[in-house]
Image (tube, grey):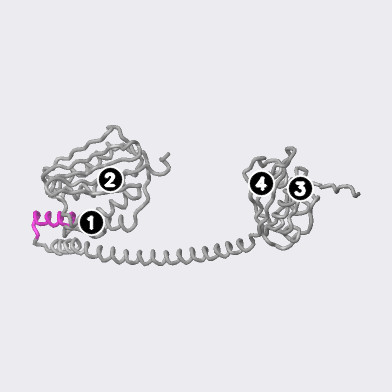
Amino acid sequence: MEPPSKHIEANPIDEDRGHLKAILDSMEDGIYIVGRDYRITFMNQALRSLMGNGEGRLCYEFFGHNRSSCEYCQHEMSSFGPEMRREWRWQKTERVYEVAVSPIHAPGNSISRLHILRDITQRKQLEAQLQGYSRQLESKVAEQADKLLQQERLALLGEISAGLAHEIRTPLGAINTGIKLLKRDSLQGEESDLIFALLERETARLERKVQEFLSYAKPRLPQVAETPISALFREIESVLTTDRQLLGEVAIITAIEPPLLTWPLDADRVKEALLNICINALQALQGNGTLRLEARCYFERALEIFVRDNGPGIPSDALPHIFKPFYSRRSEGTGLGLAISKDILANHRGHITVTSIPNLHTTFRITLRKPLRYSE
């Protein structure tokens, strides 16, 4: 009688290990495991077919790495992740791989490193092509932008030239007439004084118009300094009150909260912007009414300035156009005052709006934010 055959049960751990090895060998990406001693303990079929069998060899020798990078991988990387990614170029084939490294815990509390190599050569080539296309596109866009900017400058130059020629024709005509009259010997003292007054007035008018055009055509960047708002308002009020004909009986009222409020700004440029608005208001008031200048700090983040008058107001159909260059509802105006003011305030990180109710009030609201170097 034959002895009963012995039935040897399969080791479930060996079965799991074999099943896992079969899965790893079926993957297209290269996979290898490195122990704490830097030796490769496993390479899947895809990686062995590509580079040969390196199991048992030091990883940095087999792959041609710098040992310092391996030391970082082994000792600086946390034993619990997250995974680390880097790129590696294989000198033999010049192909580029993305290497993902993750910690892997084996029985006995030993910790190894699982490496997954994915060939990204084609992706890197596409990225390089896209970068090249992007640079070409940026170059073309910059070229077109320069052309458009040049066209805009030429158009603006033509517009300014036409406007300037139109605006200086009247004062030049008056000056020429005055010169012709002065050439006559028959002029009496009083008549001569009137002619000189005319020449002086028209010359000042011509200078003012040319200065307006220059301010608009060639603005300068603001020279920012901490400025007391009360001093700024006093200077504006002083300029306005010197022109008694323009001021008439208009009362100028100022209000600042807090009274010692200061703000970083270019005092000369902001004064110019506010004067343009105030002069427009006085022209609308025609010698009667109230002009108010108010300022307040908005939670230390913004300065608000209000210019209010109780004149006839601005027609609703004109409101969308008042800040456009060369737009004016007065025949003697250049239409640049408010456009200059808007540009000055924009260079101060500012914004200006206007509301108007006929025969009740017109309010210009200016919001200035601190320059970037003053911001937190």
Sequence-wise, which precedes: disc 4 or disc 2? 4
Q: Amino acid at mark 1?
A: Pro
Q: Are marks 4 and 2 in contact (CB under 8 Å)?
A: no
Q: Which is more toward the observer, 81 or 219?
A: 81
Q: Are marks 3 and 2 in contact (CB under 8 Å)?
A: no
Whole-Å distance between the Cαs marked 3 and 2? 80 Å
Q: Are marks 4 and 3 in contact (CB under 8 Å)?
A: no
Mark 4: secondary structure = strand
Report whether 106 appears left or right of 254: right
Where residue 35 sits, quadrant-wise, is top right
Report the residue marked by disc 1. Answer: 320
256 over 160 or under it: above or below: above
Report the residue marked by disc 4. Answer: 102
177 over 283 or under it: above or below: below
Whole-Å distance between the Cαs marked 2 and 1? 17 Å
Mark 2: secondary structure = strand
Please provide percent x and percent y for residue 297.
30, 37
Residue 28 colored in magenta in the image: no
At horizontal 74% and vertical 61% (from top left) the residue drawn is 50
Q: Which is more toward the observer, 291 or 238?
A: 291
Q: State the quadrant of the C terminus.
A: top left
Whole-Å distance between the Cαs marked 4 and 3? 23 Å
At horizontal 61% and vertical 61% (from top left) the residue drawn is 124
